[in-house]
Image (cartoon, rainbow, N blue to C red):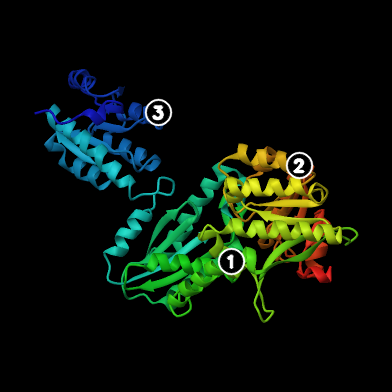
Amino acid sequence: MIPNTQRLKNITVLYCEDEDELREVTVNILEQFIGRQLIAKDGKQGLKLFVENQDSIDLIITDLNMPNMNGIEMTKRIKDINPDVPIIVATAFSNREYLLEAINMGVDKYVLKPVNIKKLLEAMVQSLLYHELRDLYSDSLTHLPNRNALIKSINSQDKALVALINIDKFSVLNDLYGEKNGDLLLIAFAKRLEDSFSDKYKVYCSGADKFVLLAKNNTQSIESLKILCEVFIEDIDKNGIYISEYEVYLNITIGIAQANDKHAYEYAQRAVQKARVSFVQLMEYDETKFEQKEDFEENLKWIKKLKNGAIDGHFQPFFQPIVESGTEKVVKYEALIRYIEKDGTEIPPYKFLPIAKKAKLFPVIIKIMLQSVIKIIKEKNIRVAVNISYEDILNKDTYDFIFSTLESNKEEAKFLDFELLESEEIEDFDLVRKFIDNARKYGCKIGVDDFGAGYSNFNMLEALNIDFIKIDGSLIKDIDRLPKQALIVETIFGFCDKLGIKTVAEFVSSEEIYLKVKKIGITYMQGWHFGKAINKKEI
């Protein structure tokens, strides 16, 4: 009985066989079941056809004993090019030594001569199915086991020790060097990880720029893993990664976790997030310090405060000056929200903004801020910038509120800037362009905040026709001592300068940083070197 061959209908097969009669018979039968065949009479011709058509070849069927180049050598060279392509060998039992060697090299199936077409078709279907299933557990770029494989491995263990290694600002590197070189960088980074850790840890690729180490046995300790990771961080910071003969420097953040409850990977993710907030490169998950029951209670408390924030008067904007680079003269202020407790304690936004975002209460914030800022502009006659998220633009109620406020306050609107949060991926550029065009009718200026922090896309700057960008503070805070940071900032500035887009440097906290950023040519600066956020009475 012929197997279900439906999945063979659209595939391309490379068939290599030196026996003319057998080749002709097999080709004539296979053409009834498959979409396309490439025919070779020996291994040398087969290798040539594979090199020329590797992107379209789905399966290879080959004899082992062939002239010019045998099937073993051809298979070896093909596997060097693409280790994942399925290969079926057709061979006489007398060639069992060849067959064992081929199996050791990674061929998927074999059929004995004389070839039984039913068995050959079964082997073809099974090979394709095997590779489809393997793709579920393998990263196509690095060929490392992927997140599915990682979770499966963790769930099979009583105790798991993992390290999550994240390449910081990878989107910036992609824009800087191009996607092709970005792929080469990921491949080279994966190889460096395997060279550094594979003796005791299995390496996984759990996302485009995320890699995971999983201890191969329970004899490894967190302390020893931390030491290995510290050495790796130092090596990457000092030596970078080589691609196409160029040395690329990058930053990485590592979260380490050990657990008996299948949550080691989740805990490592939390450690990475906390490490970034704490501005450290390596952090161990500590259940006594990370999210616990009291954190959920804190979340509920803030959700209640956010819901009442529009009427209780506890949310107030504070204003940080933005100065012109050359003159150090204040040209405008950024409005930064604070929660003021009854005793006068100022609560910074990082305490409640993430909760507002998760609870879908961010529109409450923009409404409070916009109303307050319009009032301050009217009182103080100053220019003020307000943050706005992509979700605010998507939300019809918020969108309508913004423009009804601008319509009611046309004179004040001329002194208002909107800073679009760049850390959010924009899916509907037409909608954002519409927002920008409508806001400009009222004299507002539009910028992108935290450029370099998330989905940095240079094409976006031109596509949205914005007025200014704020370069993320993570690229500025160490610019006086890290040449690679300066290189990235210079690249961003050069691109913006050509487009006539103004630039603002955040986190300018010292004279040394100020002079370095000024030398690059950045238009405006913001940071503690020029002043912290102040309340409206202090302006």
The amino acid at mark 3 is Asn
Label 1, residues with CA under 10 Å away: few <14, some 14-19, many ≥20: some
The amino acid at mark 2 is Arg
422, 292: nearer the viewer: 292
Label 3, residues with CA under 10 Å away: few <14, some 14-19, many ≥20: few
Residue at x-position 24% and y-position 38%:
127
Tags 2 and 3 touching, CB below 8 Å = no
Q: Which mark is residue 114?
A: none
- Residue 172: give x, y in percent of width and height: 62, 51
Tags 3 and 1 touching, CB below 8 Å = no
352, 234: nearer the viewer: 352
Above or below for 290 versus 475: below
Instruction: For marks 3 and 1, give the CA distance.
Output: 64 Å
Q: Is residue 185 visible?
A: yes
Instruction: For marks 2 and 3, give the CA distance.
Output: 52 Å
- Residue 307: give x, y in percent of width and height: 56, 64
524, 143: nearer the viewer: 524
Instruction: For marks 2 and 1, give the CA distance.
Output: 32 Å
Label 2, residues with CA under 10 Å away: few <14, some 14-19, many ≥20: some
Q: Which residue is mark 3?
A: 53
The amino acid at mark 1 is Asn
Residue 328 occupies which quadrant of the picture? bottom right
- Asked which secondary structure carries label 1, the reply is helix
Q: Which residue is mark 1?
A: 308
- Residue 228: give x, y in percent of width and height: 47, 71
Quadrant in which the C terminus appears: bottom right
- Asked which secondary structure carries label 2, the reply is helix
Q: Which residue is mark 2?
A: 440
